[in-house]
Amino acid sequence: MLSTEPRTYLRRGKVRDLYALDDERLLLVASDRVSAFDVVLPTPIPDKGAVLTGLSRAWFAATADIVPNHLLGVPDDPDVRGRAMICRRARVLPVEVIVRGYLSGNGWAAYRERGGIAGQRLPAGLRESDRLPEPIVTPSTKEEGGRHDELVDDATFVRLVGSTALADEVRAAALTLYRFAAARAAAAGLILADTKFEFGLGEPDGRLLLVDELLTPDSSRYWDAAAYAPGGPQASFDKQYLRDWLDASGWDHRPPGPELPAEVVAGTRGRYVEAFERLTGGRFERYRQEDHVGP
Amino acid sequence: MSAYRFVVSVMPRAGILDPQGRAVEGGLGHLDVSGVHDVRVGRRVELAVDAADAGAARAVAERLAAELLANPLIEAWRVEPLEEPVV
């Protein structure tokens, strides 16, 4: 448990824990838990929490000029070293702002059924994993208790956010962020197929802030550009190895998940570390030892 | 009215990782120095306030500290009278 600042436990997510430090600050701690097929597995992946936190921190720094964010600093606490962020509290907008540059997952399912996604028309003849002509914002609800997020249409998005002006601002920010991140990822040999942003309004001035985590493998779909082949599903850069092993093991995707053997843990950890090093341009060991992100 | 001089010290709050302090500690090995730890790096601001009395002047200095010179979410600050400027 945390040894320094007193904190109030707020929420335990699938892989992250949220604490309140005081009226103005939260502590977001990423665990080493990994989930696959929506089930949290019993075996943690060492350093996954630090990889995802390090990536969020690097992305927050790189995008601070595009949209301000909620990151204030990190705690000086050996128990959560490298995997915790101190964040400014904000009034979180109750919508997942998903940006898609490629057709996959829910977006692909919606396109197959209706030729568009949540009221946004797309050209005919697109295949699974095809690049979209332009990245699109496809907001969805935030569902609790394991229910899947639902895509919402534009009117609902405006209602959830509160005003057309704010919805437009959020959409513009999300598209700019996605384009920037997709270009960076491409330079690192990765395709950022889609990602989920969360926004909030800061106190007291109510300005738009990027909250939650940012552009991590948990909040995004990253594909290996060298292996990209549209016309079918693509391998998840970080989780495919794990998913393939789980399917080969005969598990029915219902909890509890199976314990992972050492080589699967090591292989999965390797994928996370490689994603970190490709996207930040720096060695993960240097992040762990010196808290340094970047080349 | 007189000019009252203050020094405002701004330091990272306890419990927040101080990357500059860590960087200084990391550099100690190059100097072959041991036994130095808990390095924290902050800012020192010297200023003069024109006011009718010391209490009023201090109130101005404290407001500046809290609203401009420090980010209270991640920094702690202290205001003290300045007898002599450093340089």
Image: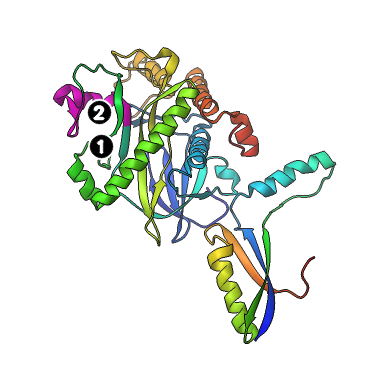
- Please report, as a chain letter, where disc 1 is located: A
Residue A62, x across and y down, in percent = 51, 39
| Image point (50%, 46%), residue name | A85
Give the distance between the C-alpha atoms of the residues marked 2 and 1, in whole angstroms.
9 Å
- Give the quadrant of residue A154: top left
The one of A145 and A229 positioned closer to us in this rendering: A229
- How far across and down, in percent of the image, does residue A23 sit? 44, 61
Q: Is A197 placed left or right of B61 in the picture?
A: left
* Kind of element beneath mark 2: helix
Which quadrant of the structure image shows residue A14? top left
Question: Which amino acid, mark 2?
Answer: Asn
> Which residue does the numbered mark 2 point to in the structure image?
A106
Residue B68 percent across, percent down from the top left: 55, 64
Residue at image point 47% right, 29% down:
A184
Q: Are marks 2 and 1 in contact (CB under 8 Å)?
A: yes
Is residue A44 at all visible to an observer of this figure? yes
